[in-house]
Amino acid sequence: MGLIYMEQIRGYPYMTIGKLADEFHCSVRTVGRRILGIQEEIKKGRYSPYSILEGDGHPLINTYVFMDYQKYQKPLKDRNARKYVPEFNPQELAKICGYCQREVMIEEDKP
């Protein structure tokens, strides 16, 4: 009989503009432009209204939304190419980034 346990890796679900700029090696101005694009996509329904949390002058941006928009920003702006952009799937991003919960089974050695 083996041992089963839950492994959970945590990350930052929301980041400030400065933290995103540091993490993704871009300027604060670039992050600001991405946020404007994300806000447009929120209006169009691609992202949830909770993708950007406004509060006390420092907005917090969902990391997975930022990553998705960073990848698909150009085709999302083109109405013909937009048709071929896959649906936003935060679970897939979480799996790739390692921020998820999974069962791990340790097999018992047989004598």
Image (tube, rainbow, N blue to C red):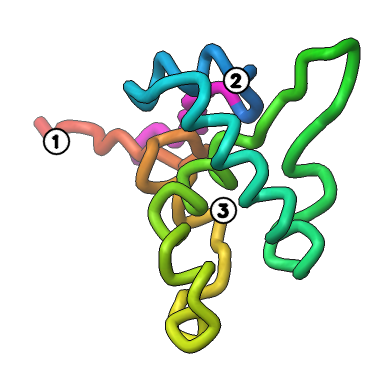
User: Contact, CB < 8 Å: mark 3 with mark 2?
Assistant: no
Q: Is residue 83 left or right of residue 38?
A: left
Label 2 or label 1, whichever comes before in sequence order: 2
Q: Quadrant of the C terminus?
A: top left
Residue 81 x, y percent position in the rendering: 43, 82
User: Contact, CB < 8 Å: mark 2 with mark 1?
Assistant: no
Mark 1 highlights which residue? 110
Residue 71 x, y percent position in the rendering: 39, 54
Q: Is residue 105 above or below residue 70?
A: above
- Which of the 4 image quadrants contains residue 107? top left
Q: Residue at x 84, y 50 (%)?
A: 49
Q: CA distance from mark 1 to mark 3?
A: 40 Å
Q: Is residue 75 left or right of residue 14?
A: left
Q: Nearer the viewer, mark 1 or mark 3?
A: 3
Mark 2 highlights which residue? 17
- Classed neighbour count for the residue bearing mark 2: other residues with Cα under 10 Å, few (<14), some (14–19), many (≥20): many
Q: Amino acid at mark 3?
A: Pro
Q: Residue at x 90, y 11 (%)?
A: 56
**Is residue 70 within the magenta segment?**
no
Q: Between residues 38 and 49, which one lies in front from this camera angle?
A: 38
